[in-house]
Every structure is written in structure tokens, then in C-alpha cells.
Amino acid sequence: MSGNIELLDRTLAAAKAEGRSALIAYLPAGFPTVDGGIEAIKAAFDGGADVVEVGLPHSDPVLDGPVIQTADDIALRGGVKIADVMRTVRAAHEATGKPVLVMTYWNPIDRYGVERFTAELAEAGGAGCILPDLPVQESARWREHAAKHDLATVFVVAPSSKDERLATITAAGSGFVYAASLMGVTGTRASVGAQAQNLVERTRATTDLPVCVGLGVSDARQAAEVAGFADGVIVGSAFVQRMLDAADEAAGVAAVRALASELAEGVRGHA
Amino acid sequence: MPSEYFIPDPEGRTPSAEGYFGAFGGKFIPEALVAAVDEVAVEFDKAKSDPEFARELDDLLVNYTGRPSALTEVPRFAEHAGGARVFLKREDLNHTGSHKINNVLGQALLTKRMGKTRVIAETGAGQHGVATATACALFGLDCTIYMGEIDTERQALNVARMRMLGAEVIAVKSGSRTLKDAINEAFRDWVANVDRTHYLFGTVAGPHPFPAMVRDFHRVIGVEARRQILERAGRLPDAAVACVGGGSNAIGLFHAFIPDTGVRLIGCEPAGHGIETGEHAATLTAGEPGILHGSRSYVLQDEEGQITEPYSISAGLDYPGIGPEHAFLKDSGRGEYRAVTDDAAMRALRLLSRTEGIIPAIESAHALAGALEIGRELGKDGLLVVNLSGRGDKDMDTAARYFNLYDTDATVAADAAGESAEIEGDAK
């Protein structure tokens, strides 16, 4: 069984052909429950997300701000396992036919086994992985197995990345490049700085891969702004915050759908 | 003139250019930190070959820290260690009360060389935090210390010391609210403020170059101890013994003895309530290889790579990871690691206090408890050097509760029972 990197490539190309940015939503698996998380992801697609990243909750989410830390805590206290992450990927992909990635810290994959993880993710219909704390120089083994299973390897680049390093990273990556809009952890911000646009330009100079921008984007206005210069807009904490604020799971799912609809307008330039 | 107290590994044996000690180490960091971590590596390499850096650091280590630290023989304590000769390397006598100042002064000088104006650090027992706050006061740097909320309670005295020195202390309320979580929060701060901020990491873990750099700043401990024991005992010790949390004081003592294959290098890990209870922080005894805080080493984790919550009565050892060079020493067989329970450490703390008039930190008491065992194994011809990494003032509240010292009536009874138990134990 092979993974869905090709579906991911095609989806991002289709958005580009429509003259717009893609909307990429992030939601953790098992939050607030495994089934509730699946419903939330389906709602994000339903509202207009083109791609979803399923977070693999971690005990030590060093790159996440308080919102996603809270969601991870809830998921882990609920007993979420890697099998539940795979089930979430499968359910979300089968229900929608859309590309679903996993975003995870490296240690869970390292411990679970790269071979086993990539095989199971491909089998579940996954399109690839975003690995924010696996630097490119430590990634050879992962990339070998990901390629074997037709899974994308999405690397993160940052405003502090030097041009030479950007070239090394983008040469090793596939699917798209995740450009961190700012120096910091996940979470919503009042504004997404000019350094995001500069980073996208510097990254584009090294690759033909789509360059998608994440960190800090929370509403349609910001999505429209980022869509003006990036191939995709990634939104995570704002979705999780809607779920946390909701009175119950159903209200949370509805709020995710509503936010996805607003953001889908944003990436089409309507703020 | 070569430096006397800043003595980086002269042979450059380890790590590799990529930061590996055998299978352990490396640099597992987010892209946002790559440039900053590389800058630290470049600056440290430059500093190592710059006589001016060595001169400045030497001056501080002698005239501010008070190096060299004494090597004290403890014969009354050693009577309980099978009659072996026991010498303590007195890092507790350094300014600020522990070995931590060796590394902090080195990295603080690097901070200035990099043109950064703000320092952040994690702390468990508070000793690294106090040393960092001290150096920041000395050099006029802004200072923020992250400390797990549980540790701010059990090491309240050190929180007050840091604040007195002008540092901002942030109590971390996430996860197990101990050292691991303080490091997580410090990394989050660093990612966001890396332009003007140096993360003054306190142990021999973390991404390359920290394990090698922090080791090199602490190598002076073993270099001095080796020279001192040759002068005093006329031979090398049978074993060098140290407590191990992240492993900085242990690697500092061990490193100069690595080529001396007759010297056993023995690290004492915190067994907490006992390995079998699951409430411990004995990473090398009970952990598995994994990645935590930027490097591959042994880690306390479950089958899916989630880090498990450690426990130790000692805030400074209450950590689910360990420096990669210790993982390498363990796997290569050059290092030996054994686990010491809370109770054994606390008994050793009291024993050293009562036999020698030295109150050790609870961290260091783990090494002392290990030394009592090792001494009994070696017998009266044995010769040990034990790193007394810190003093116990900060632990008086924990110790007073443990030994019931606050209740004047109960003290006498607890006291008498404790003494006789110790003497009985010794007679076996």
C-alpha cells in the first residue's frame, strides 16, 4: 500500500491553478476524544480546508505554545496512542478523499520504529509527515523509508535559516515547505510579520516546491495577507482554541467548520 | 601561558564533528535554533584557542570562584565505607556552593563575546540558576531562570537567592513541574528571543555543542582531583564516584580519568522510592535510547516515545534524560552506573554531616551513599575520590522534614533511633 504524496502534490497544484493559496488546518489526534478529533477534522475539510495535518500529541511539545500544549495534555490523559493517530488519518482521508499528513516530534517515531511508522501511515492513507524537530542532517533514514512508501517529508524553515541551508533543506524535502512566519512557538499572533514574506521569497529561490506559511495565522484577514505571497496558509492554534472555548464537542466541531469557511474565503483573497 | 583551570579535552577524542559520542548525541533541534546553536559552537571553538579567553576565565575561576577546590579526606565517614580511604572533591566550596559556577562563568564570557545581552537558564535544585544569576549580576546581563513549580517549593531558598541577585524566576506549571519542564519552557523562550538571548544550558545534555562544551568547562574538577590524589595518596584511586542527573559534575570528575583504565568511573543515579516502584529518575538503569532536549541518549519513556515523569527527592537529579557522553561511557563499559534510593542518600547526608561536619547537597549525597557501598565492596585497601558537587544549605527544609528536625520533642527520639540503625548497619 502506498502513501498519498501524489494526492498532496495534486491538491496543492489545483489550488495554485485556481490562483489561490491552499488552506492547511492542524488539529491534534485524540482531542478532545479520538472520535471527536475525527469529527473536527472532517468539519475542517467540510468548511474548506484543502489539507489537514493531524498532530501526534507529545508529552514534551517544546515547539508549541499553551493552546496546543493544553490540547496535547487532554489527548494524552485520554490515553491517545499512535494507533489512534493512524485511525484518525484513515477516517479523515476515507471520509473526504483529501490529503492528510501527520505532524509529530521525532522521538515517538524513533521509538516506534521508522519502518513500522511509515508502513502504517501509508497503509492508513496518509500523505506524509511534518517533522519540526528532525533536522535535515539527521533525516536520511526517515527519508529513505518515506520515499519507499510514497510519503512526503515536509521540512520547516525559519526566518533565521541562512540561504545556503534553505537550499539543503528544500532539496531534501517533498510535498511542500513549511515556512515558519516568525521566530517562536505555535500560537495566534496579532500580526504576521514582514519576515514571513521575505522567507517565502528566499525559499522560493531554492525550490519549485509549494511554500506554505504557518505560525500565528488565526483569522481570514491574516489568511488573505499571507495568501498574497504564499502557496498555502497553515492554521493550527486558532482551530484548537475554538475547540477549547466550545461548550461541548458538537459546538466545537461546528466552530471548527465555521472558522475553516472564514479562512477558506481568506485564502481566496476575501477577508 | 597555558590555562591552569580552563582545560578542554586536549585530545579531542569526542565528540565527532556532528556531535556524536558513539551512537549518542547529535543535534535534534528545530530549524529556528540551528543558526544560534551553530553560533555557540563556532564561538566556543574560537574561545578554546584564544589565550585571552583562557586568561579571563582563569582569573575568574581563581579570584572569584576560589579554585582550586580542596580535596578533603574523610576518615570518620570512611569507617562506614568498609575502611576504604575516601577523599571528597570539594566543589561545594566554590562560590555559590556547587560545581555549576565552572560552566556558568565560561558560558557567560561566551555570551559577551557573541554580543548577546540576555541569558536564560533552567534549574532544578536551583544551583545552576543561582550560579547563572550570579554571573549575570557580575557581567550586567539580563537574566531569566525557568524552574519547575515543585522545585520552586522544595528549593525556596535558592529562589530567594536568584531574586536577590536580580534574576527573574519563572515557575513552570506544565508537565511534571520539574526540571524537564523548565528546560521545555526555556527552549520556547529561546526560539522566540534568540537574537539577543543565550541559553546558558546547565548540564552535559542538549544539542551539540552543549554536551562537549559544558564538559570542557567542568573538566577542571577531574584534572585537579587527579593531581591532588596523586600528591596525597601517592596513587590513582580505585574509583571516581559522582551523582548523575544530567551528568555535569560526574563528567567533570570522570573525564580526566578516562585514559586511566585502572580507575573505575561510577555514576550514582537517583532510584527515588526504588526502581521497582517506577518512582525514580534512574535513566541509565531503567531508560531506553531516545531523543530528549536535542540529543540522542538514554531516556525514561514509554513504548510510544512519550517521556515518563521522573521522581527523586533531589530536585537536581529529578530528570528523565542524561548527557549523551554518559550513555556512551555506559555502553562502552568504561563507565558504571548504579542506582541509589532517596533513603540511602538521606542516610549518607546525615552520616557525612555527623562524622565530618560537612552538610552535602541531597544530589551529592547520592554519590556518598554509592561510595559507602563501593568502599565496602573494595575493603580497607580501597581508595575513592567522590565529587561533593554541592553544599546542603538549600536542602535544609527537605532534610528537616525528612528527619523530623522541626519538632523539638520528636527530634531526640528520631535522632537516637537513626543513630543506632546506622551503627547496626555498619556492623554487618
Image (tube, coloured by chain):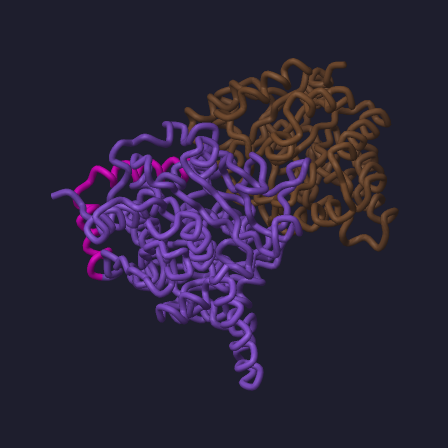
Q: Quadrant of the N terminus of chain A?
A: top right
Q: Could you tell me if residue B197 is visible in this image?
A: no
In percent of width and height, residue B179 lies at: 53, 54
In percent of width and height, residue A255 lies at: 81, 46
Shade of chain A as shown in the rendered figure = brown
Q: Residue furthest left?
A: B1
Q: Residue A128 colored magenta?
A: no
Viewer-closest of B103 and A17: B103
Viewer-closest of B63 and A179: B63
Q: Could you tell me if residue B90 is visible in this image?
A: yes
Viewer-closest of A41 and B351: B351
Left/right of residue A12 with respect to residue B79 in the rendered view: right
In percent of width and height, residue B397 lies at: 51, 72
Viewer-closest of B62 and B140: B62
* Chain appearing in purple on the rendered image: B
Q: Which residues are magenta?
A: B35-63
Q: Residue B36 colored magenta?
A: yes
In percent of width and height, residue B377 lies at: 44, 48
User: In percent of the image, x 79 and y 36: which residue is there?
Assistant: A41
Q: Residue furthest front?
A: B428
Q: How many marks?
A: 0
Q: Quadrant of the C terminus of chain A?
A: top right
Vertical relation: A168 (above or below) B417: above
